[in-house]
Image (cartoon, grey):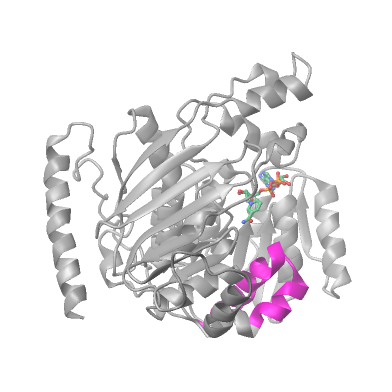
Amino acid sequence: MNDRRTFLKNLGALGAGVAAVGAVAPAVATAAETAAPPRPSGSRYLGDFAAPKLEQVRWGVIGLGERGSVLAGILGQIEGSQVVAISDLYSDYCQRTVAALAKHGRPAPAVYQGDPKRYHELLARPDVDAVVIATPWEEHAPMAIAALRAGKHAFVEVPLAPTLPELWAIIDAAERAGRHCMMLENCNYGREELFYLNLCRQGVLGELLHAEAAYIHELRFQMQHVERGTGSWRTPHYSPAHGGNLYPTHGLGPVAQYLSLARTEDNFERLVSFSSPGRGRTLAARKNFPPDHRWNRLKFEGGDISTQIVKTTLGRTVLVQWDETSPRPYSRHDLVQGTQGTVAGFPPRAAIEGRGDYHKWLQGEAYEKLREEFEHPLYRRLGAQAEKMGGHGGMDSIMLLRLVECLRRGEALDQNLYEGAYWSAVRPLSAASEAAGGAPQLFPDFTRGGWRTTKPLAVVA
Ligand SMILES: NC(=O)c1ccc[n+]([C@@H]2O[C@H](COP(=O)([O-])OP(=O)(O)OC[C@H]3O[C@@H](n4cnc5c(N)ncnc54)[C@H](O)[C@@H]3O)[C@@H](O)[C@H]2O)c1
């Protein structure tokens, strides 16, 4: 414990030094520039927020494309959860979800389709407690804010919103409404991620110093969606130069919780970002589409691979990477390193002092043994059921089972409003850093100081 105190004290001193250096470096935004605006009156901090118990959670789902249809299908299988209303622009997407719910013996939900404003009718229904928003990124903030103003809990797909002003507007709306607004980061409920969280909490890795997170997922095929579907709205996002990391949260969410960032122990302080040249989307457009096609009229200037280093308040480091274009295998990196060892995903492996030769990764059977010892209790309880229910190997189902459980018990959720904002903020901050030649960008304090007293996420059983 004394060692830990000395370590933290030294880091504190180092932090002061860094701040002093930052103060003389003109490229570094000052704390005053990024200072949080005061909390509007009538609003309250929601770090450990728990809402009154709900007997049944009655859902509205907005957006029934690739993602929303999966979420609605899972919500329709959970006890104490009922999808009462759905909304999408397309009637065939709505009917697909109606049919999926019927297959699980659930009554037909009310359907609001065919017009971009009809989701407001869903929000006006008194029998909707909570809303899932699984629409294109630019719709997240307006829809979440409208849902919160209508008195609903809002559960928003990733990222929470693509810009800092939108993130602040969501925070203000949730704090004023006194309702949950959680970004649905499903990867925090992956089996390995839960296992690593447990290892961190049990102290097996020692003092945590560094983590690595990524979303490396080759998605050029989505350019085939031209009129509608994910690629139809997502492809133009690859176009602007200095786009930074468009999709940071899948890798970052879990490692941020390993380090308890924005929850008492430490917080996001600043980041720097650099990207490679952008090549792959232009090549794909030329190869697969006629010269006058929509995609060939766009310039794809955002970098194919984008890399950030986040420095935390305690001086710890997090590497974040993103690449949806290059031909390479999928990875979220999912690495966390401490004074006693390291675990990493893709493929899963560990090296821990006192558990074999740490110059070599523990893999295969030896790794399975470690996992058996430290399997997260939530996975032990819900893993088999969730795998049957589906959704990215079951992690979507664990997330939604857990959400319904917390709402019915009136407990705080595993991810709070502010974590969603911090994880999402890597996109605009990485873009700003790249536009400024890689200059450090300070994270806003979305919690307005509240992170210092917000409990770290415990190992939920
Ligand atoms: N967590 C994950 O694993 C995961 C996976 C895929 C996508 N996502 C996220 O889910 C969201 C949706 O992505 P997707 O791939 O399903 O896209 P999609 O294009 O397949 O679906 C979006 C749907 O939103 C609907 N929509 C748009 N505007 C609307 C409006 N005004 N009213 C009602 N419906 C409206 C569209 O008709 C469309 O069907 C994105 O935020 C994406 O980042 C998350």
Residue 174's x, y, as percent? 44, 60
Q: In the rendered image, which quarter is residue 205 located in?
A: bottom left
> What percent of the width, then of the height, locates residue 187?
57, 62
Going 67% across and 63% down the picture, which residue do you hit? 60
* Quadrant in which the N terminus appears: bottom left
Q: Along the line of sight, which residue is nearer the eye, 66 or 256? A: 256
Name the residue at 72% across, 33% down: 223
For residue 129, say whether it is visible.
no
Q: Is residue 387 magenta?
A: yes
Residue 210 at x, y = what percent? Answer: 36, 59
Establish if 90 lies above or below 207. Answer: above
Q: Residue furthest top?
A: 291
Q: In terms of depth relative to the viewer, which is nearer, 148 or 65?
A: 65
In the rendered image, the vertical position of residue 94 relative to residue 327, given as above or below: below
The answer to if 401 sits in the magenta stretch is yes
In the rendered image of this protein, does residue 392 appear above or below residue 199? Answer: above
Q: What are the residue bounds of the magenta stretch? A: 382-410
Q: Is residue 224 left or right of residue 338?
A: right
In the rendered image, which quarter is residue 417 located in? bottom left
Residue at 18 percent across and 31 percent down: it is 26
The residue under the point 45% across, 71% down is 357
Left or right of 227, for residue 129: left
**Residue 351 placement (x, y as % from top left):** 46, 68
Would you say the magenta stretch is mainly helix, strand or loop? helix
